[in-house]
Image: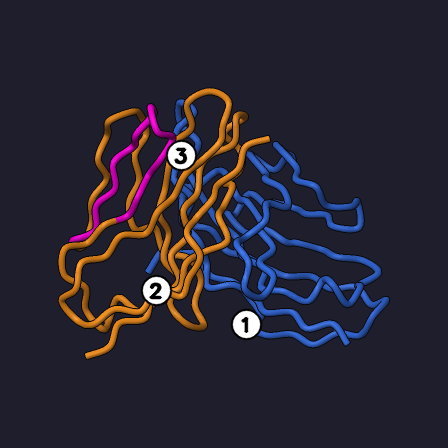
Chain colours: A orange, B blue
Amino acid sequence: GDSVTQMEGPVTLSEEAFLTINCTYTATGYPSLFWYVQYPGEGLQLLLKATKADDKGSNKGFEATYRKETTSFHLEKGSVQVSDSAVYFCALTNQAGTALIFGKGTTLSVSS
Amino acid sequence: ETGVTQSPTHLIKTRGQQVTLRCSSQSGHNTVSWYQQALGQGPQFIFQYYREEENGRGNFPPRFSGLQFPNYSSELNVNALELDDSALYLCASSLQVGGEETQYFGPGTRLLVL
């Protein structure tokens, strides 16, 4: 079945460091891909999305490119801030388009 | 701020009891989905409702049921609670148009089953 694999965390960085969180997926068809962020004690917020191969989603300095050939959707940011500390989830739509399938999440901790 | 609200924020129940969780979707959104997020895990899809009918279901037993109302609100009901039902329950609303929809999540209800 469809699935998402994210790099294990936690990821610990200093402020202004470069961030990469790896995400690969297995899916039939051509799913839409998403990154969601969850701050402590809160629900999920959509960070960015891409709906077809080679699309680049971007928001608040974060970027991810839909790579069909490597089935990947890695999240990157050039300079992280303390306020970026959160749990990041990679997700895809199932074949029916009714559900999101999530990875286990990657915890990012940024220190000043 | 996604415009999706959930109530209550926290709830404690005992094994065998029944619980109802509520969600208010963004105005105009015709689709609501419910997810269960166990501690340290990603959310797992429970089911989706589109125009008040169940439109898809994940790998959850029938004791998990739902309703969607015309006023953009919805309910998740869980009967015969088990200890493993302790989790954060998230609802997400979306506008289903042409097969591409982005889901917007509420803050969740944290359920503890003792």
> Picture coordinates of residue B105 (x, y %)?
44, 53
Residue found 39% across the figure and 29% down from its top: B100
Q: Which residue is mark 2?
A: A11
Is B60 rendered above or below residue B9? Answer: above
**Residue located beneath label 1 in the image:** B9
Q: Amino acid at mark 1?
A: Thr
Same-subunit check for callouts 3 and 1: yes
Which span of residues is magenta-colored?
A: A61-75
Say the numbered circle drawn on residue B101. Answer: 3
Judge the density around disc 3: few (<14), some (14-19), many (≥20) Cα neighbours within 10 Å: some
Q: Position of residue B98 (x, y in %)?
A: 40, 22
- Residue A79 magenta-highlighted: no
Residue type beneath disc 3: Glu
Q: Element at badge 2? A: strand
Q: Tell me which chain the residue with mark 1 is part of.
A: B
Between A10 and A1, the residue placed more toward the observer is A10
Q: CA distance from mark 3 to mark 2?
A: 30 Å
Residue drawn at 77 percent across, 67 percent down: B83
Give yes or no for residue A73 being in the magenta stretch. yes
Same-chain check, marks 1 and 2: no
Give the structural element (helix, strand or loop) at label 3. Answer: loop
* Amino acid on which disc 2 is placed: Val
Q: Quick check: B11 left or right of A59?
A: right
Q: Residue furthest top?
A: A29
Helix, strand or loop under label 1: loop
